[in-house]
Image: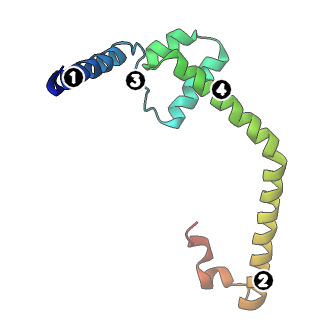
Amino acid sequence: MNMDTGTGIIVVLFIGLLLAMIGSSDSKPKSDKPQNEKDRITLEALSGKTPIEEIAEREGVTVDEINAWKEEFINNGIQYSKNRDYLEQQQFQYERDIKWFEETCEKFIGSDWKEKTDYENRNR
C-alpha cells in the first residue's frame, strides 16, 4: 500500500465519520431565546396546564431544553432562598451607608447639597 492510498482511506473514513455524526443528530438546534422568554416558557411548563411537548412544539424548542430551563430556574430559586438573609443584610447595610453619606454631605456642604452636587441626576 503506497502513501497516496493510505491517505485516501483515512480521508474517506474521516468523511464517513463526520457524516455519521451529522446524521445521528436528531435533536433540533439549541434556541437562542432571550432569558425573559425562557422564563415565560418555564413558568408555563411548571404550571402544568399545558403538556411540555405542546409548549416545545409551539415555541420551536425541544423538551430537553425546557427541562433544562426548569432545572436552572428551580436551582436559582433555591440559591436565592439560601442567600436571602445575606442579601437582605447587604441591602440594609447599603441603605445605612447611603443615609450616612447623605447626612455627612448635609453637615459639610449644607442642606442644599443635593442641588449643589446635582445628586439626583448622577449616573447610577
Do the residues under discs 2 and 1 have CB atoms within 8 angstroms? Answer: no
Identify the residue under disc 4.
71
- At 48% from the left edge and 17% from the top edge, which residue is drawn? 62
**Amino acid found under the numbered disc labelled 4:** Glu
Which of disc 2 and disc 3 is earlier in sequence? 3
Compute the Cα span from label 4 to label 1: 49 Å
Label 1 sits on a secondary structure element that is helix
Identify the residue under disc 2.
104
Which of disc 2 and disc 4 is earlier in sequence? 4
Compute the Cα span from label 3 to label 4: 19 Å
Residue 105 picture quarter? bottom right
Q: Name the image quarter holding the N terminus.
A: top left
Which of disc 1 and disc 2 is earlier in sequence? 1
- At 22% from the left edge and 19% from the top edge, which residue is drawn? 9
Compute the Cα span from label 2 to label 1: 82 Å
Identify the residue under disc 3.
29
Which one is closest to the eye, mark 2 or mark 1? 1
Is residue 85 found left or right of 57 in the rendered image?
Answer: right
Do the residues under discs 3 and 4 have CB atoms within 8 angstroms? Answer: no
Label 3 sits on a secondary structure element that is loop
- At 79% from the left edge and 79% from the top edge, which residue is drawn? 103
Do the residues under discs 3 and 1 have CB atoms within 8 angstroms? Answer: no
Compute the Cα span from label 3 to label 1: 36 Å
Identify the residue under disc 1.
6
**Amino acid found under the numbered disc labelled 2:** Thr
- At 47% from the left edge and 36% from the top edge, which residue is drawn? 34
The percent position of residue 18, horizontal first and vertical second, equals 31, 21
Is residue 30 found left or right of 75 in the rendered image?
Answer: left
Which of 39/74 is in front? 74
Badge 4, how many Cα within 10 Å: few under 14, some, many 20+?
few
Badge 3, how many Cα within 10 Å: few under 14, some, many 20+?
few
